[in-house]
Amino acid sequence: MPELPEVETVRRGLAPVMEGAVIDHVEQRRGDLRSPFPKNFAGRLAGRRITGLGRRAKYITADLDDGTVLVIHLGMSGSFRIETAGGAKIAGRFYHPRSALRAHDHVVLHLSSGAVVVFNDPRRFGLMDLVPRAELGTSKHFKGLGLEPLGNELDGAALARLFAGRKAPLKASLMDQRLIAGLGNIYVSEALWRAKLSPDRKAGTIATPGGKAKPAAEALAGAIRDVLQAAVKAGGSSLRDHRQVDGELGYFQHEFAVYGREGEPCLREDGGTIRRKVHSSRSTFYCPVCQR
DNA sequence: AAGCGAACCTGGCTGC
DNA sequence: TGCAGCCAGGTTCGCT
């Protein structure tokens, strides 16, 4: 489900309740998600203060006061919700009163403030792990990750360097988290439309033989940044189950130019009809006329 | 080595 | 109404 903008939306939603909070106790309601929880997971979290919440690509990180980091991935269907004893407003947001646990509630963090943070994940493609802060960058989760697309490193020159010589299509290359980390199926389609580039075009063609940026590389880098920034601003995209932690929907799905719009007209005057194409059992949406 | 398809798992929607 | 089939925002494994 969640790509970078949805993950960032979740992080921002959790921050006012979790940053500075102390974890009173944790209910771990099954032994594994995509991978097993670390040994003594609940016990290691109990009593810890959360000093800050961060994000890297599609991972949320919670720094703990004992020097470890709680690493969280939402997979396809992971979500958080915040509940409070009688319903309460914290930092301008309203949180629902505590209700019964639901199917697929796998982890429940009881904070000493009285707030309760619930992780739900029907498909169990998500994960949680505990990693020493000093080993985070070399951990199995982070060591292979490529550029952070909202950081300062992503520009035309960087894209050209990454894609030079690649024969794989732009779609597959943008999905490859080892190159750029954070894009997924929706925002790849949207960024390619914004840059007027075909998903089937070979990635290497945006660079010169020497690895320098062609105009297409600049356009693509700009499109990626723009679409991600706009989506974060909109609270992400809610197609089926992405919600902000207070239950509000994101609304960037209303701004999709191509995703889910098969058969509808391209938004450009000189565009054609949006097509859907399946790559490795993944839909790609694009305009065959204006994307080259 | 790079590139591609399948598998992991559940729920929701469509069409017969 | 019931059920089979298809689809879903991610990652990883195994085979060319």
Image (cartoon, coloured by chain):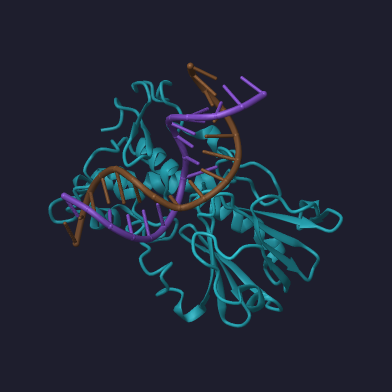
Chain colours: A cyan, B brown, C purple
Residue toward you, A62 or A216: A62
Image position of A125 (left or right of A50): left
Residue toward you, A214 or A10: A10
Residue A169 position, x and y percent, is 25, 43
Residue A240 position, x and y percent, is 58, 38
Image position of A174 (left or right of A267): left
**As drawn, which residue projects farthest toward the bottom?**
A66
Give the residue at x 39% y 39%: A189
Give the residue at x 79% y 68%: A113
Residue toward you, A21 or A230: A21
Image quadrant where residue A90 sits? bottom right
**As drawn, which residue projects farthest toward the right?**
A86
Classify the position of the C terminus of chain A by image quarter.
top left
The answer to whether A129 is drawn above or below residue A266 in the figure is below
Residue A248 position, x and y percent, is 68, 43
**As drawn, which residue projects farthest toward the left?**
A209
Image quadrant where residue A146 sits? bottom left
Give the residue at x 65% y 73%: A42
